[in-house]
Amino acid sequence: MYLMRDMNKTLWIPTLTTLFLPLVCSLTLSVESAISEELKRPQLRVRGIYGGIPYFSEENPKRLRELGINAIFLHSGSITAEKVEYVKSQGVSFFAEFNTLHVASYLKDHPDAAPVGSDGSVSPPPHGWQGICPTHSAYRKYRMDAFRDLLVRFPLDGIWLDYHHS
């Protein structure tokens, strides 16, 4: 704080330090206690396979858990009820990889859904991975319908929202 005198008036003007120091101290304690609480939570270790499911035969009867696998991640378009049942019957979690902003085939029929740069021109695909404009209402509906369908059809343990860049 500092003192300011003006025409027989004495004013105490708080400085930024005196105003925000208690807040900063409080936030620091809150963050420290949150980290402490986080460390007390049970840790989850995922040992998964992405993109495929190893199938075993009677000649090779190993199960996924015996190999240390506790999660399978498959592209949402390749998921079937049989695959989910097979994986879950072994006590393994099943996750869908859901493509959010990269269904490039959508652009063939809807070129207006291409992302546009600040100069007004269509943004070129970086490394061949063309995204879709996240504000294109028809595309958003298209992907949300597919997302809902996935949730309704399969008893998934989670969904990985792939290509969700900001």
Image (tube, rainbow, N blue to C red):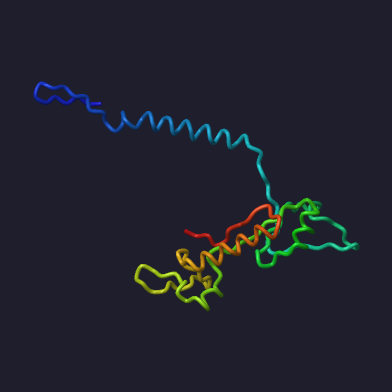
Q: Is residue 124 left or right of residue 143?
A: left
Q: Residue at x 45, y 74 (%)?
A: 112
Residue furthest left as drawn: 7
**Quarter where residue 154 is shown:** bottom right
Indicate the position of residue 11 as horizontal and vertical percent values. Answer: 18, 24
Q: Locate the N terminus and report the quarter of the image it occupies.
A: top left
Relative to 61, residue 8 above or below? above
Indicate the position of residue 38 as horizontal and vertical percent values. Answer: 58, 37
Q: Residue at x 42, y 74 (%)?
A: 122
User: How many numbered marks does the figure carry?
Assistant: 0
Indicate the position of residue 18 as horizontal and vertical percent values. Answer: 31, 28
**Quarter where residue 150 is shown:** bottom right
Q: Is residue 49 left or right of residue 138?
A: right
Between 75 and 44, the one nearer to me in the picture: 75
Q: Residue at x 82, y 55 (%)?
A: 63
Between 43 and 148, the one nearer to me in the picture: 148
Relative to 121, residue 9 above or below? above
Between 10 and 29, the one nearer to me in the picture: 10
Indicate the position of residue 100 as horizontal and vertical percent values. Answer: 55, 63
Relative to 44, residue 33 above or below? above
Q: Is residue 135 left or right of residue 90?
A: left
Q: Is residue 156 left or right of residue 54?
A: left
Residue furthest bottom as drawn: 108
Residue furthest right as drawn: 59
Q: Residue at x 75, y 59 (%)?
A: 84
